Amino acid sequence: MIIGVPKEIKVKEDRVAITPSGVKILVSNGHKVLIEKSAGLGSGFSDEAYQESGAVISSASEVYENAEFIIKVKEPQPCEYKYLKKNQILFTFLHLAVEKMLTQELLKRKVTSIAYETLQTDDGRIPILAPVSEIAGKMSIQIAANLLENRNNGSGILLGGVAGVPAGKVLVIGAGKVGMNAAKTAIGIGANVSIADVDIDKLRQADAMFGSRIKTYISNQENLKELVKDSDVVIGGVLIPGHKAPCLITEEMVKSMRKGSVIVDLSIDQGGIVETMDRITTIDNPSYEKFGIIHYCVPNIPGSVARTSTLALTNETIKYIEAIANKGIIETIKNDNIFARGVNTFNGKLTNKGVADALNMEYTELPSIIGF
């Protein structure tokens, strides 16, 4: 199979979809890998390193024109839509629940798209999301601590506190992978940490892991109203695979916060959980103030640490890329439910119900198309 790796063009997105060692694995299996020139530079991988691993350095148009299987990190940008073609396989983060235009393009062009964030195991884990969630969760506290500084119009709170001065208060909403890593990092610097989730079992896990160093709450409007008001930092970490994120923090709650407090919404790539986050920001212009509260809503936070993120992502994706390349997409889907759950569009049909519901579009069950 011919596998293509374009250079990421989203603002300040320096990750790349595969490392030279990953290329070597694919080439050893008899596949041809086309890498767009300079695609790996932001992550510290030179064109020469890819060539030594067996890749062919190409232009963007050559990658898309010749590749049967495109692997990326982030969703195609509008200027890339023209390159997508019928029966091409696209494997990347897609977040189609908030990307109607891209969804329509994938359907029109009959692209088989597989989303990293909906590829799910039988026990509900999202393996490819795990490493980026870990990175984003840890970085969210680092980012929030920086934004609290006076030079950034923050409230001037040191999250860890000092002797005789209480620590800052951090509220994490969502006790999944991203939320637990945010909580772990916040506890590590000495913050006063609370975590809220609708799943009592996840809260029990948080209690078992952190003990008295964390307070746990059921996530409901009454609890969130009081918790948000009392927090210096709010971290949003809610994910419902394939679906748009629920709006949990109202404008009224935001207005109740102390001026200069910070909200970092890690759910923004699925629409976000904060009513006042009315725009997506970028790594080079990441935050804005509304009602005196600093809003940070960058959808590709791990892109800020591209080297670590690329290595961590490839550790997870390479086995799935290899399986698709070796077996072909139909056999892979038929023989593994993980891949079947990951398919969002196939032959002009929308095959993820969460996306279909969010966009109010027609849903088609994948088995009815390919017969398994």
Image (cartoon, rainbow, N blue to C red):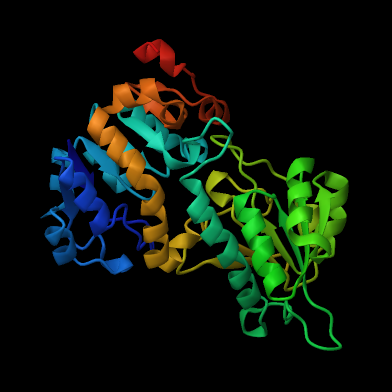
Q: In the image, is 209 to the left or to the right of 61? A: right
Q: In the image, is 344 to the left or to the right of 80? A: right
Snapshot quadrant of residue 265: bottom right
- Please say whether residue 85 is visible from this viewpoint: yes
Residue 177 percent location from the top left of the image? 60, 51
Snapshot quadrant of residue 334: top left
Task: Look at 86% across and 88% down and name the residue there.
Answer: 164
Task: Look at 16% across and 46% down and name the residue there.
Answer: 27
- Please say whether residue 77 is visible from this viewpoint: no
Task: Look at 62% across and 79% down and name the residue there.
Answer: 152
Residue 256 percent location from the top left of the image? 83, 62
Quarter of the image that includes the N terminus: top left
Residue 85 percent location from the top left of the image? 23, 32
How many circles with numbers are drawn on the protein?
0
Residue 23 percent location from the top left of the image? 22, 51
Q: Out of 256 and 71, give the one closest to the viewer.
A: 71
Q: Out of 337 and 303, give the one closest to the viewer.
A: 337
Task: Look at 73% across and 57% down and name the residue there.
Answer: 209
Quarter of the image that includes the C terminus: top left
Snapshot quadrant of residue 228: bottom right
Q: In the image, is 334 to the left or to the right of 238? A: left
